[in-house]
Image: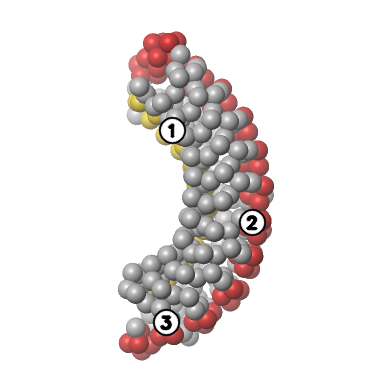
Amino acid sequence: MSPLAELLGLKVLSIAGNGASDLSAIANSQFLQDLSIRNNGVTETDALRTCPQLRSLSVGGNPISDLGFLEDLHLLRTFEMSGCPVEDLTPLALVPNLNALYMDDCAAEDFSPLSGLRFLETLVITQSNLSSLEPFRGLTSMTELQLNSNQISSIEPLRSLTSLRSLSLSNNSIADITNLSNLNAIYYLDLSNNQIESVDVLEDMSGLEYLYLSNNQISSIRALDENNGLSEFDLVYLYSNPLSDSSRFYWIPRMQARGVEVFYQ
């Protein structure tokens, strides 16, 4: 990587999957704005502190356990850290202007440091130890939220996130979805692989275009038929639910008749 030290005007750089472990060659890169070091062997991150213009940074797939370098990246807007063995998320509070945060397979258990990220629009936390959504209650700028494969049972804190357009909560332990009632901007909703019995709240979510409800305990889908927003070319997935005869032979055919594509068995 030593030749990189001579590229003083570099703005965009990806060294993903190159077996790199030493970042000293990019130290003091005063113009670097977009950097990906994914899937390497990086543990030492001091060089990142000397790249003050970074707007986008991807460090996922590295054995990085300390996010302290974030305190010097005041302009950072997008940060990806999937698969890093980070247990302390406190340094994330030092970059309050983040717009997008990706942290799949996260080792942390305390997500409260995220509560101050008021400008966050996209948040992805999957295959992690997330159980409480309380830290996200005040993140009202959020438009995309992916929380698949966690330990979530209550979604009550999401009721204030009225700007949400895309919400993914598959593979959790959710039974009650009534708190989605005022999230009317959502067009993409994935609730598959949960414990949901009633979908009545979805009747008034007229913006829905993509709806994933497979592998739940849903019997009646009358509310979906009465959702006039579900129309031609919209998709509804209902695989592996104990659908009633009225759902199979009345409500689903009515939806299909107006062009909704319904998948079930």
Location of mark 1 (residue): 212
Q: Position of residue 181 (x, y in %)?
A: 61, 31
Q: For residue 22, which numbered disc appears in the image?
A: 3
Residue type pointed to by label 3: Asp
Residue type pointed to by label 2: Asp
Residue at horizontal 57 percent and vertical 44 percent from the top: 151
Q: Position of residue 111 (x, y in %)?
A: 62, 55
Q: Is residue 84 visible?
A: yes
Of the numbered discs 3 and 2, the one sitting upstream in the chain is 3
Residue type pointed to by label 1: Tyr
Residue at horizontal 37 percent and vertical 23 percent from the top: 264
Q: Nearer the viewer, residue 28 or 24?
A: 24
**Which is more foreground, mark 2 or mark 1?**
2
Q: Residues within 10 Å of mark 3 (few under 14, many from 20)?
A: some
Assign a secondary structure to mark 3.
loop
The residues bearing labels 2 and 1 have C-alpha atoms spaced at a distance of 29 Å
Where is 69 relative to 229, above or below? below
Q: Position of residue 82 (x, y in %)?
A: 46, 60
The residues bearing labels 3 and 1 have C-alpha atoms spaced at a distance of 44 Å
Location of mark 2 (residue): 110
Q: Position of residue 41 (x, y in %)?
A: 41, 73
Assign a secondary structure to mark 2.
loop
